[in-house]
Each structure stands twice: as C-alpha cells, then as structure tokens.
Image (spheres, helix red, strand yellow):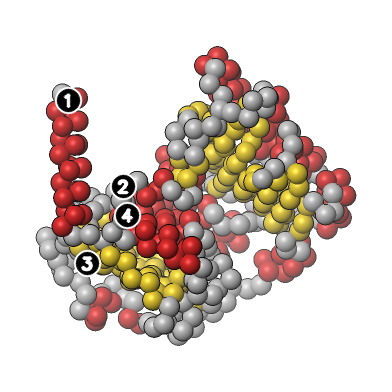
Amino acid sequence: MDVSMSFSQDMDDEYEKLIRRMNPPRVVIDNDSCKNATVIRVDSANEYGILLEVVQILTDLNLTITKAYISSDGGWFMDVFNVTDQDGNKVTDEVVLDYIHKSLGPEACFSTSMRTVGVIPSTDSTVIELTGCDRPGLLSELTAVLTHLKCSVLNAEVWTHNTRAAAVMQVTDDSTGCAISDPERLSRIKNLLRNVLKGSNTPREAKTVLSHGEVHTDRRLHQMMFEDRDYEHRVVDDDSSIQDERQRPDVCVDNWLDKDYSVVTVRCKDRPKLLFDTVCTLTDMQYVVFHGSVDTEGTDAYQEYYVRHIDGSPVKSEAEKQRVILCLEAAINRRVSEGLKLELCTTDRVGLLSNVTRIFRENSLTVTRAEVKTKGGKALNTFYVSDASGYSIDAKTIDVIRQTIGQTILKVKNNPEEQQQQRQKPPSQESPTRFLFGGLFKSKSFVNFGLVRSYS
C-alpha cells in the first residue's frame, strides 16, 4: 500500500515537472506603468496552493501589497500585484528584484519556495510549538522554565486571540549553542512546558510539539490556532466586547449559483500581511481562489474572492458559511496589534527574555503579541502589552519598567494617552468613494470586466 502511494506521488511530481518545463512560469516587474507602486505580473501553470506561495514570497520580503488581481480558472495562473517597500515607495533594490525574478520566474520551484525566505532553518536549533489557554504572565512563565532548563531562545513569535495563545520558538542549548538532541531532555522540556500551559485549569487541551524540521512561523501559527479552534466565539464579560464589535472585520459569503462560485468579501482596516493571512486561511480550509481582487485606500482594505472547495463545490450550507466567516475574522484579528508597542534592542544574553517578561508581569502588564529575534549577538524584540486588569496603561508604569530595564534599551513606540484617545474615537463613516472601484465590487463585479469564465 505504501509503495503504491509513494509511486503515485512520484508520478504526480514528475507530471508537475513536465508541465513546468512545457509552460515555464514568467514574471514581469514594471516600475514605470504605476505612479506609486511596483507592478509584478506572474504567469504560471496553475496548481493548488500556488497563490499562497506567491503571496508568501512577497510578504516575507516585507513588501506591502496595495492592490492585486487574481485569475487562476482553468489550467493557468495569471496574477498582478502592486507592491511597495516598508516606506511606501516603489521597490528599487536590485537584490530584492533579482530574488523576486528567481523565486517567481522560470527558475522557481513553488513546492519548495517557502523554504527560502521567512523560514526558520532549524538544523542547528530545536523548534518548540506551543498552544494553550492565554493568561496574564504566561510568556514570563514559559521563558522562565526554558531558562531553568538551560535553553536559549534565538527567535520566537507569540500570538494571542480569543483567550487562546500560540507560540513558535527556536531554541538552542545554552552551553553548546546547538540543537538539543538528548531524548530525555527533550521529553522533560516538553512535559514542563505543557504543565505551564495547563496551569489555568481550562478544559481545552494544551499542546507542546518539539521538532528539528524547517517551519514557516506565520503559517504554522495560523495552522496551530485554526486547529485549536480559536475562531469559536467565547463569552467576554467586560466592556471590551463593545469595542471589539466596532473593530470586527466585515466578512460576507454569498453563493453565485450561475457560476458555482462562492463570493467571499472582506472589509477591514489595512495592515501589513493582511492578504497573506486571508489567503493562508482559505488555503488551509481547502478552498481554491479562482478569481480575486484586492484594493487598499488609506487605512481601509477590501478583498473579494471567487472560491470553490477543493472538491469543486461552492459553500454548501449556512453552517459552512458561518465557519468561513468566523475563520477569516480570526485570521485577521490574530495579528492585530492590540496594546502598547515596546521595542527592546540590547546585547543578547542567557535569560534576557525571561527577565524582561518577568518585569512586565511584576508591573501587571500582559503580552498580547511578541516577536523575538537575535542577530549578530543583538536581541531585537518587539512586545505588544496591555494592562492585565483591562485598564489603560499608566504612563508611570512604563517609566518604572524603562528605568528597570534601561531607558536606552526599551523604547515606547506609541504613547498610552494617544492610544486611549484613539480607542475613544467614534467609528468613521464609510464614504461612497471609499474604495477605488466603488460599486463595481458587488457579488458579480467580475462580470462587468468579463473576467469570469467557468471551466467546470
């Protein structure tokens, strides 16, 4: 049975290689036709997941996708992306442009592209994946255990959403600086971390996975939280539920029966990696995007997808429709940067992350999201923190924390008082010209362009 499946897989791989040789992918980068963005056109033989991998490559290069036009009906993939760098300018860095050509052009191999940028190479380190119930001080407790077990955290990303927490950490042995390979030690690390995650007496399961394989952190975090069902609604017993409802993304799913498509539309505040987050979730839910359009204007984003399930059918029931809506809302909200942003830059040392998060906890701050990196002996960490009791953060508390850690080491990126004023602002009224194409983005907008054809 296994031999037969392996043979079948090999045949599929050879067939895909043949199709690629006959129809090599083509990428055109145009810095002339658009005034304020670099236009990237990608043509390729179509295959499941190719849209996500293209978006992933562009996103991992820290490029912002301001507009996109997606068409992959039939056997061909034809997409156009308008992108800018982090400063909102056209992409002119020759190294980046050359990488895009190599990653998306004839030399590309999409099945392995995700192993290049944005991937943790863990042959010299151990990757720890954690999922459990969120609570104040959780990150402090986890890092304290790792420090006690003589593990150094090289890189980590932590997300919290809807009372759940997920983390992907890259650690090494303190003494050797290499991956941890002793099975007994790995088992002890796994069990102690799981005990910390279980500490809140929640009926939901806590998970701890250790590996030495390569992992794309953002995609794994989405998958982990999706598997943990963080999209399910939970009771919120404080006033923040009112504010959450105001900021809730507007996600709609309707069936276009004439063409057997489900039309998914998303309206929300724009932010970096938004397109990756929504496409990643649709792919992980096994939906194929046949056509789509993405547009941003100011702080607003609009996305429209024409999708079918991988089995060829549109959304079949109201329950499935609601699940798609909830999962996309969760994907958008997981990376929303709630709380005060703090940036730490200092010489890396053993126990640094544990000490910093302990100071946060002792001052009644909880970490809602974290990005931990080490490069050239330097720790470059970003924390989003909020008051553990739900109140606005007192500026005096931040001053105390900065004095304890070091005024030049820990920087505040947004003022607590300004943050509070932003939260109190009423929601803006939607303008009839809010989106570039206005009323064309309806359930049948692509009919107006003559772009939608069914090959089923």
Give the amino acid type for the residue marked by disc 4 in the picture: Ala
Amino acid type, callout 1: Val
* Quarter occupied by the C terminus: bottom left
- Of badges 3 and 1, the one in the foreground is 1
Q: Percent x, y for residue 430?
A: 50, 79
Task: Kindly state the secondary structure of the residue where label 1 is placed.
Answer: helix
User: Residue placed at 20% from the left, 63% from the top?
Assistant: 76
- Disc 3: which residue: 256
Q: Does residue 205 appear left or right of residue 366 in this picture?
A: left
Q: Give the crowd class for mark 1: few <14, some 14-19, many >=20 residues within 10 Å.
A: few
Which is nearer the N-term, disc 2 or disc 1? 1
Q: Residue at x 19, y 30 (%)?
A: 6
Q: Name the secondary structure under disc 3.
A: strand
* Front of the two marks 3 and 2: 2
The crowd level at tag 2 (other Cα within 10 Å; few <14, some 14-19, many 20+) is few
Circle 1 sits on which residue? 3
Q: CA distance from mark 4 to mark 1?
A: 29 Å
